[in-house]
Amino acid sequence: MKTAILSFDVEEFDMPFEYGGKPSMEEQIATSVTGLKSVLSILEKYEATATFYCTGVFALSQRDRIRAVSQIHEVASHNYYHSSHMTEDLQASKQVLEDITQKDVRGFRMPRMAPVSDADLLAAGYIYNASYNPTYLPGRYDYRHIPRSVFQQNGLIHVPASVSPKWRLPLFWIAFHNYPLSYFFYLCKKVAEADGYLHLYFHPWEFTDYTDLPNGAKYPFYLHRNNGHKMQERFNLLMAFLQREGFVFRTTSWLIEQPYLFPERALKNA
């Protein structure tokens, strides 16, 4: 059985600051809320569960919404703030999310897939880290030395984003906006054949017309191609493709609990 792990980074939409924009915090939250509504509607249509990595700032501004999300999907941490980090933020964001959802928060993803200490994550109480995109992105990171699929390191489980088996072509959100859909679907099939599962990540704000917002940002073409309604259409096509191919939609926590991944952990917990 093939498994699709869909994940979404739910954050204050601060990307405009990287390109000359100056949105207010209210505008940042509102953009992500609009996109989140679209994401949840599409997931409901396909009866799919997913993992939502949420910042503490966004969660505190949308308590009822995040609590409702947690009733169906997994809620994990996306740090406390999206644009800054201190070690104590790891525990603070986890606590905020657990207070709101009344559920254990097991996973973490660092904004912009930035490095984060295994020891710090374990000390804060996390079980897994989904902060690796095991490919090369000029100006961002080079994680080509990282294993392509789930692995354990220093007692922490890591769930990298999916990349193609041979050339490590990324399947993250920018790729989804810019690859021809037929090629993206082909890579999805190849990853599933190699790994037994597919792990994709997106952002709610991609599902909005964020490039039309009057905040002064000038985005590169590859960042605003196929956003908004086009993104909603493409994502619907992706969901329909995954369904046709027999994928079952699961959360990240479900994936790391599978005994075939870490037999030693399964025996220990038996």
Image (cartoon, grey):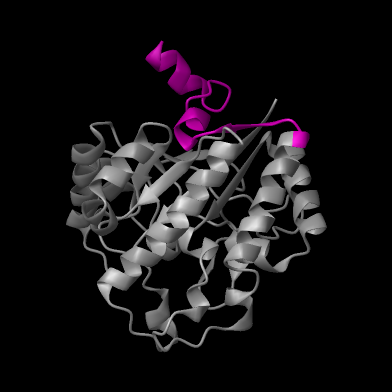
What is the x, y in percent for residue 147? Answer: 59, 48
Of residues 167 and 73, the one nearer the viewer is 73
Quadrant housing residue 179: bottom right
Q: Which residues are magenta?
A: 244-270
> Does residue 138 lie above or below 167 as drawn?
below
Q: Is residue 185 left or right of residue 50?
A: right
Considering depth in this image, is 149 or 55 the residue closer to the camera?
55
Task: Depth check: give the residue in front, 127 or 111.
Answer: 111
Q: Quadrant of the N terminus?
A: top right
Q: Position of residue 53 (x, y in %)?
A: 39, 49
In the image, residue 91 above or below residue 224: above
Left or right: 160, with 82 as reference point: right
Q: How many numbered dots are placed on residues in this image?
A: 0
Tell me where residue 267 appears, x and y as whole percent.
Answer: 45, 14
Residue drawn at (61%, 36%), measured in percent from left and top?
46
Left or right position of 69 against 199: left
Can residue 107 be seen here? The reply is no
Task: Say whether residue 131 is magenta.
Answer: no
Instruction: Using the rendered image of the protein, determine whether residue 230 is visible from the camera's viewpoint.
Output: yes
Specify whether residue 247 is painted magenta: yes
- In this image, 239 relative to 150: left or right? right
**Image position, residue 29 (x, y; %):** 32, 64
**Vertical order, 196 against 132 (above or below):** above
Q: Quadrant location of residue 21?
A: bottom left
Position of the C terminus, as image quadrant, is top left
Residue found 71% across the figure and 40% down from its top: 242
Question: In the image, what residue occupies the spot 72% across and 50% down?
Answer: 237
Residue sitting at x 18%, y 50% = 92
